[in-house]
Every structure is written in C-alpha cells, then in structure tokens.
Image: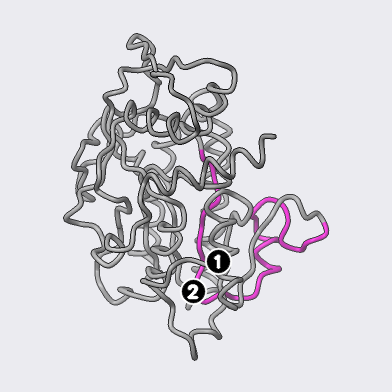
Amino acid sequence: MLRDAVVIEPGDKMLQKFLVLGGEGFVGLHLYNELKSRGFNVERTVRSELSSPLSGDIDEKLLGNCEEPDVIFHVAGGASVVASISSPSEDFTKTLPNLNTLLNKMKNDWRKSKLIYVSSAAVYGSNASSNTSVSTALKPISPYGFHKKLAEEMLSFYAQTYDLQLKIIRPFSLYGPGLKKQLFWDVLNKARRGNFSFSGTGNQLRDWMYIDDFVRFLLFSSQTQWEQRQRIFNVGTGHPISVSSAITSVLSAAGYDNIPKFIATEDRKGDPCDLVAARVELNTELLNTLTNFDEGLLRYITWFNEVSK
C-alpha cells in the first residue's frame, strides 16, 4: 500500500463506487490494486478476462454493464509516442472513440459521476521546457500528443456545454514496476545485450515520477478541489534530470560500470528537448512525500530482473 501522506478518509467515502477504464494498463493496474487494497468498491474494464462483463472495447454495451460510478478514472487509450508515429490511425482509435462514448454516457445517464481523465504532458510538444506551466500553449509534435489534445478539447466542451464534473491530469515521465517500454526498460534490455549506445545527445531534461506517487495524486484528486474552477493539472516532480544522468543511474544501480554513448544524429521523433513541470504549480503535499528517484530505480530494476529471467 502507498504511504498515506495523501489519503482518502474512511467513513462515508468508503461507500463510493469507483470505475477504472483501462484497468489492465500500467497506470490502471496500479490504481485498481491500490483502491482494492484500501477496501473500496471498484470496478475496472479489462481485455484479458473474456468471461468478465467489463471485458473488451469501451463502448455503450460495456458501459451499460457498469454500475453508475461516483468517480471514473479514464486511463485507457494510446500510450506510446513511438507507436503513434508508426500507426497514427490506431492511436486515434484507441484514444478518442471510447472517450466520446463515455462523455455521452455521462451526459445522458451518469449525471452525478465525476471524471478524472489522464492525458499527457505530450500535449505541450515543441513548447515544452524545463519549467512547463499548465498555461503553456499546446503544440504537440506526435500523433499521440495531438490525440490527447483533441481529447482535452472534447472534455472541455462537454464540461462547459453539459455541466459535467471532470478534471484533466497531465503526467510527465512516469516509471515503475509494470512498465515494459520506454527509456528504463530499453536501457536494461540493451545492457543485457552489451549495447550501451543511445540516440540523442543525452542532454534532454525529463521529469520522472514514480508510479506510486502518481496514483496517490489521482486518489487525492478524486476527493478534493471539485468546487474550484481549475480543471487541468500538471503532475510531476518539478525536478529536472538529464537523460544521460538517468541512464547512468540505471546502469550503475543495475551493476554495470559502462559509460553510455550518445549518437546525436539519432533524435527520437515526437520527443521534445526538455519536458519538466513547473514546480511552483505542483501539489505541495505531494512534493513532500515523493519517492526518491534512486529508490524508485532500485524497485524498478528488482521488478525487471524478476520478469525478465
């Protein structure tokens, strides 16, 4: 269970019904397991359990099998910048139709439900920086970021037009056990093959947040600040770490003494130079309880060694 610096109080709130859309993904599974461990009434949509009435695409039929929830966490959809570049239509299909279905379900039937939608800091695109404000103009540079931007526009339109209660969360670089893609997964797999070369300059700055900290923010957000006008939140640490430093830390923690080599002519498409949240805008209580980066890496490496034997 997560450290309880940010908690959902017991009592009447234990009677709340939660619905996690995308409950088998990286964020969704961690979120679902945490809600279950705290004893909350929670359902999730899945794909692997074919016998479940909540298995399959998130469409009208599937939502019709759900009890009307008090809080909905939408963590479904495309989840890869690289995959979206190679197949933008597939990323679109994963991201937008199910959100359209949900918003119309809320408009017509689930009027009291509150929605927390997990978007992405990828919406900032070429305007991202080492101090990215939530007010930064959106200029995505990947289909993934563009589709998240479209999703946010849908959400804002429905909230204003139909008076729906919702929040948009923009996480930065999440990591932790269960993530079988992105930088740390790639670094450790490359290292096992004796490959220590990486694309880019290594100077790019990122804002890495451990998954438990992000889940804790989602739980906190589900219970607070609904009366405020602010609807969109950046979620990160506000602490910039260069890609080269992060890779060096991963290799060292995993027992390698090799120095990473960077190939500056091979920048990854769709990735901004720097992508770090403006610390002044972040939740103060959450910042005081963040998982140490090196501690998070050790947990991730331990998990990696277990699943990749």
Of tags 1 and 2, which is closer to the observer?
1
Q: Nearer the viewer, residue 271 or 144?
A: 271
The amino acid type of the residue labelled 1 equals Glu
Question: In this picture, which residue range is highlighted in magenta?
Answer: 51-79
The residue that label 1 is drawn on is: 34
Q: How many marks?
A: 2
Residue 123 placement: quadrant:
top left
> Magenta span: helix, strand or loop, mainly?
loop
Give the image's coloring scheme. Answer: one colour
Q: Is 103 or 123 nearer to us in this picture?
A: 123
Other-residue count near label 2 (Cα within 10 Å), few / some / many at <14 / 14–19 / ≥20:
some
Residue beneath the point at 20% across and 37% down = 130
Callout 1: 10 Å neighbours few (<14), some, many (20+)?
Answer: some
Q: Counting residues from the N terminus, which is met first, the one under dot 1 or under dot 2?
A: 1
Numbered circle sitting on residue 113: 2
Q: Which mark is residue 212?
A: none
Would residue 290 appear left or right of 254 to someone viewing this image? left
Q: Amino acid at mark 2?
A: Ser
- Residue 31 position in % (x across, y down): 53, 61
Of the 4 image quadrants, the one containing the C terminus is top right
Name the residue at 22% across, 41% down: 137
Report if residue 73 lies within the magenta region. yes
Element assignment for label 2: loop
The answer to whether 30 is drawn above or below residue 124 in the figure is below
| Distance (Cα) linking label 1 and label 2 | 21 Å
How far across and down, in percent of the image, does residue 146 sit?
39, 36
Q: In the current view of this chain or complex, which residue is farthest to the bottom?
A: 11
Q: Nearer the viewer, residue 9 or 141?
A: 9
The residue lying at 54 percent from left, 46 percent from top is: 77
